[in-house]
Amino acid sequence: MSQDRIPCDLKIEHGITITLDGRRRILRDGAVAITGDRIVAVDTAEALARYQAARTIDASDRIVMPGLVSAHCHNVQALARGLGDDVPVELWTYGRIYPYETLLTEEDAYWATLLNCAEMIRTGTTCHADPGGYAMDGVGRALTESGMRGIFAWAGMDDFPPGFEPPPDFPGRRGTEETLRINEALLKRWHRTANDRVRVSYGLRIEPNVSDELFQGVKAYADRDETLVQFHCLLFGLAEEVQRRTGMSTVQWMAGLGVLGPNWLLVHMAAASDSDVVICKTYDVKVAHNPGASMHSTYGAASRGKFPELLARGVTVGLGCDSTAANNSLDMFRAMYQVATLHKEVRLQPDLVLPEKALEMATIDGARALGWEDAIGSLEPGKKADVIIVDTRRTNWVPLHDFSIVPTLVYSGEGADVETAVIDGRIVMEHRRLLTIDVDKVLAEAQRIAERIVRQLPYQETLRPRWPVA
Ligand SMILES: [Zn+2]
C-alpha cells in the first residue's frame, strides 16, 4: 500500500550483500537503502520492497559490501612510483624518498593525491589513513574534491642522529614545538571537514627521528583533539637505532614514556617481539599491516612478524597498501590475498589468517584502527553510506557457492572487479567510470610532474633501466 512506502535516495538491491554486521550476515538477495550520507536499512530485497528510492541500482550477479579501508596509504608519494624499487629500507627512506619529498610542492601533492584517490576508488577503497608528508594542504584539497574519505597527518620528526639524517632542506626537518604547531594548524584547517569525510590526525615519521618530547607532545595533543597518532614503527633496518640507544624496543620505550593508548596507529610492526605483542594488547594499540610493502621492500613482516600472534591476542590489525613507491599497488584485494596467504605459507599452517579475517581487516577492523568504526566498516543502519558493488560475472568468480563467497572474494577477486563505488552516499564511480576525478587530466599531470622531479633528483643518474630501452 502506498502509505507504507518509505522514501529514500538510493537503493542497491538483489546483490549478494556481505554486511560485516555483528553477526556477519550475508544476504543472498539483499538490499541496502540510503538517504543522504547514511545507510537507513539493510535486509533482504523482499523486506526492503517498501523503500521507494529516487534511484535504484540492480546488483544482480554482483556482491554488495562495505567500501574497503586502507589503514596505511601515502598520498604524497604517489609520484614516486619506480623510485624505490629493490633497495634496502634505509636507502629507500633517506636516499630515495626524502629527496623526492623535498622537491614536492603543494600543487604536486594535490595531483599526487588525485592519482592515489583514482587508483583507490577504482579498486574499491573508500577510506584511507595517510601518515602524511609536508605538503598536506594539497592533500586536503584533493581529498575534498575527489569524494574520498581519509585521515591524514604531518609526518613529524625532530631528532636527527648521525646516519639517520634527511637532506638539509628536507621540509620535515623541524624542532619539537614547531612540528606540533604545524600539525595542530593542519588539524584546525581540515579536521572533520567535508561532512566529516576528511579528518586529521597527528603523525610521527619513523623511529630514529623522534625525541621523547615529541612522543609526549603528539600524545597530549591527540588526546586533547580526540584523534589518532600515526607512526611507522618497528621496521627492520630502523628499529635497531632505538634498541641501541635505549636497550628496549620502540614499543617498550613508548610504554615506559607513558604515551601508549588506543589512539595509536602503529604502522608495519615487522620487528615486534612477543612482549611487544602483549604491550599492544595491554594498551589497545592499533596496528596497520602492509604485507605488500613488506614483500616489496623486505621489512620482514611475513618471515619474522608476529601478526598471527597479534590477531590471536585480539589486537586490532588493519590492512594497508602503503605507497606506490613501497608496494607498489593500492589494490586492497591484492592486500587481502597477501595477508590470507603469506603467513600460512611461512608457518606451514593452511588455516592461519582465514579469508574472513582478511576481509574483516580490510573493512571493520580497519575502521576500528582508524577510530572510525562508529561510522564506517560495515553495512548497518545509521552508518555512513560507503558501499562498493563487485561484478561476479567474470571468469575469476565462477563457480561461486554459498560456502565460497568470502574465500572467492579474497583468493580470486581483484580490484578491477569493482564496478561501482559510493562514498558518503555519493556515487563516485559507476560502471568503472570515475565521476569525481578527471582521470585523463590526472594521468597527464602526474606523468609531467614526476618527470620534472626526476630531472631534479640528486640521484637521477642512478635511475637506469636494467634492460636497454631503445
Ligand atoms: Zn608508510
Image (cartoon, rainbow, N blue to C red):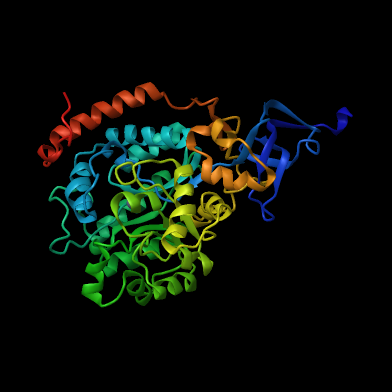
| Vertical side of 217 occupied by 109: above or below | above
Is residue 225 at all visible to an observer of this figure? no
Q: Is residue 375 left or right of residue 231?
A: right
Between residue 222 and residue 206, name the one nearer to us.
206
How many numbered callouts?
A: 0
Q: Is residue 25 above or below residue 441?
A: below
Nearer to us in this view, 186 or 243:
243
Snapshot quadrant of residue 52: top right
Q: Residue at x 53, y 33 (%)?
A: 417
- Left or right, 461 with reference to 427: left
Residue 339, position in %: x, y?
46, 53
Name the quarter where the C terminus is drawn: top left
Q: Residue furthest right?
A: 1
Q: Is residue 9 above or below residue 251?
A: above
The N terminus appears in which quarter of the rendering?
A: top right
Give the residue drawn at x 37%, y 33%: 115
The residue depicted at 58 percent of the width and 36 percent of the height is: 397
Residue 117 coordinates in the image, percent (x, y): 42, 35
Q: Residue at x 44, y 31 (%)?
A: 145
Q: Percent x, y for residue 330?
A: 40, 41
Nearer to me, 337 or 132: 337
416 relative position to 212: left or right: right
Locate residue 88, reporting x and y percent.
Answer: 22, 54
Res. 368 in view: yes
Q: Is residue 225 above or below residue 250?
A: above
